[in-house]
Amino acid sequence: MSSSHPFLVKFFPILIINLHFFMRVFFLLALSLIRSVSGSTPLSPPRYDSIYSFGDSLADTGNFLRSGALAFPVIGKLPYGETFFRHATGRCSDGRLVIDFIAEAYGLPYLPPYLSLTEGQKSQHGVNFAVAGATALDSEIFYDQGIGKILWTNDSLSVQLGWFKKLKSTLCNAKQDCANYFKKSLFLVGEIGGNDYNYPFFVGGSFKQLRALVSPVVEAIAAATSVSSNASRINFFYPFAETRPGFITISSDN
């Protein structure tokens, strides 16, 4: 895009600002679920050496900003980042995100956005592939529906998985080596899927049209586990199940 989208200019500056309480609540829920799935207890030591994150604005630590999707992205300046980092980082928040708190809890550094890595650079403790505005479905689907022009980014979940596969070759090659490495890694898939409903909704999509997207969105997210094809064991966690009660309320009012 060559200029900021009108909707983004109007509403994006107020999205996810002063959400410390929100982030902490979801962090606690996410961490408790991760420990439940992994079998660890609140007092057990961290069991993950790296984290790989996929998703949208609730997990993006800077990919959207670096992608150049918008000429003048508001997340590239204060008040974004002002309460913790003291400067804008590309996060859609004035501070940290849930993924940041999860990394802290496991004694790991904050995940660098994939687009910040230089050619051949390794990041042994994980990478963040999430992109603000990303969809679970491929962007071509929305272009086919005639609403592709309002997408904030074309870096859908499948694009993010492609980035991971490219990075993977710098981390391990042999099947057993990859198995040993990734069994100590945590994969966070989400939050993702909300924008698949947002974009059609922005242009007046009906509740029936939105509901028809549920199955393909869920299937796209489930298919993300294919990144484990070359590893004998991998730890996946889906931190946010995407529900849109506001859409349901609006539909019931109509």
Image (cartoon, rainbow, N blue to C red):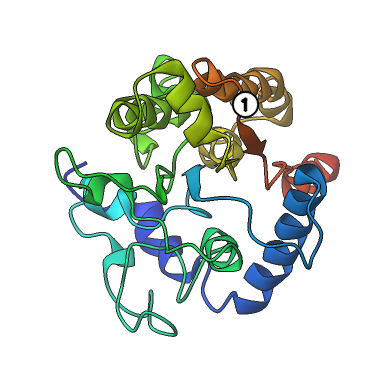
Residue 237 is situated, as x and y percent measured from the top left of the image, at 67, 40
Work out whether residue 190 or residue 170 is closer to the camera in this orientation and state it: 170
Relative to 152, 204 lies left or right: right
Residue 75 percent coordinates (x, y): 33, 65
Q: Amino acid at mark 1?
A: Arg
* Location of the C terminus (image quadrant): top right
Place residue 232 in its image quadrant.
top right
Please give the residue where the numbered disc 1 appears in the rendered image.
233
Position of residue 191 relative to residue 151, above or below, is below
SS for dot 1: loop
Q: Is residue 44 left or right of residue 205?
A: right
Q: Work out whether residue 244 or residue 80 is closer to the camera in this orientation and state it.
A: 80
Relative to 149, 56 lies left or right: right
Q: How many marks?
A: 1
Q: Is residue 204 visible?
A: yes
Q: Residue at x 78, y 58 (%)?
A: 32
Q: Residue at x 35, y 61 (%)?
A: 9
Look at the image and tell me in which quarter the N terminus lies.
top left
